[in-house]
Amino acid sequence: MGKSILNKKSLDFLERYLNNASPTGYEWEGQNIWMDYLKPYVDTFITDTYGTAVGVINPDAKYKVVIEGHADEISWYVNYITDNGLIYVIRNGGSDHQIAPSKVVNIHTKKGIVKGVFGWPAIHTRKGASEKPPKLDNIFIDVGCKTKDEVLKLGVHVGCVITYPDEFHVLNEDKFVCRAIDNRAGGFMIAEVARLLHENKKKLPFGLYITNSVQEEIGLRGAQMITETIQPNVAIVTDVCHDTTTPMIEKKTQGETEIGKGPVVSYAPAVQQKLRDLIMSTAEEKDIPFQRMASSRMTGTDTDAFAYSNGGVASALISLPLRYMHTTVEMVHREDVENVIKMIYETLLKIKEGDSFSYFD
């Protein structure tokens, strides 16, 4: 496959896909971009009521393997509009209130995007030790209006979803930076696996379901729905995990994983050991670097939804190490992105139709 597996078309798709807003519950525009890119590499698509999209290779095969990422990004909802035209918010997913002050926002309305800013008192007006930190009940959005009626005339109302406009860029040649890399990077990587299978003319002995789930950020909801539709035998999930080498992160509790050192393979009850062993032995055989992470009771990713569905599905998690999760400057290393793609691709070529991954075979 050569030194680099990402081409210009791939990177153009990544940038366009990341820059598009895809808040939880409103993922369909991003899903259309994703399906348009994936279309040449699959036989058909499945979509469901809430917006999960699945590209399928070999749809008539009885044995089914899922590779999965999630499509949604964290956001805010308009919750309350004051009489003098300021907007208070609630979370849609794990949005970080501490990064909000001074951020520009896009408020999504039926009339189009309305720009606003998270306002904050000037430093000159705050009192040393008594100054208040940003909290969910004191951050607010200013759209330049003086009254509630002015806000409503813009098309802004309670329930409008709010995203950040921060777009894709590259730092120091090989660091990808954007909001929502968690986890549209996952959707990108599984699409690239499908592209490589197509371009390298690989024929799989099973049905492959390239799955881009919705609503992960509010509790794995899209994965819970689509696994019942697909009823897979195997699921390989990709998401992001923390780079724990940056300041103010405690390795004793968070473990040690770092961007640039390879994909992260998880240990957790939901991760099926034989499938995980296949992934790691394949990586070792193909000289793909990887790291390890222990996740205790649950992974907190769509892996849990797949693993505990349909009477139990052999599932594993391959994570992309990421800095500054749930901020607008999420950062990953290009080599890690490529190595996640390689790891999934090479593992698929090792799976045989009918593999049970049972401990008792």
Image (cartoon, rainbow, N blue to C red):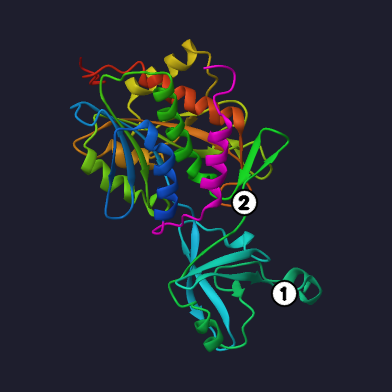
Q: In the drawing, what numbered circle is on residue 34?
A: none
Give the x, y percent position of residue 306.
30, 38
Q: Is residue 246 magenta?
A: no
Give the x, y percent position of residue 248.
66, 45
Q: Is residue 267 above or below residue 146?
A: above
Q: Which residues are magenta?
A: 1-26
Count how many numbered circles sit on residues in the image. 2
The answer to whether mark 2 and mark 1 are in CB contact below 8 A is no
Disc 1 marks a residue whose amino acid type is: Pro
Give the residue at x 56% y 65%. Answer: 106
Q: Earlier in the sequence, mark 2 or mark 1?
A: 1
Q: Which residue position is annotated with label 1?
A: 121
Q: In the drawing, what numbered circle is on residue 167?
A: 2
Q: Residue furthest right?
A: 124
Res. 100 visible in picture:
yes
Res. 258 visible in picture:
no
Q: Nearer the viewer, residue 329 or 49?
A: 49
Give the residue at x 34% y 32%. Answer: 42
Q: Is residue 87 above or below residue 252?
A: below
Give the residue at x 40% y 23%. Answer: 197
How crowded is the residue under tag 1: few (<14 C-alpha within 10 Å), some, or many (20+)?
few
Side of 286 relative to 358 (left or right): right
Secondary structure type for disc 2: loop
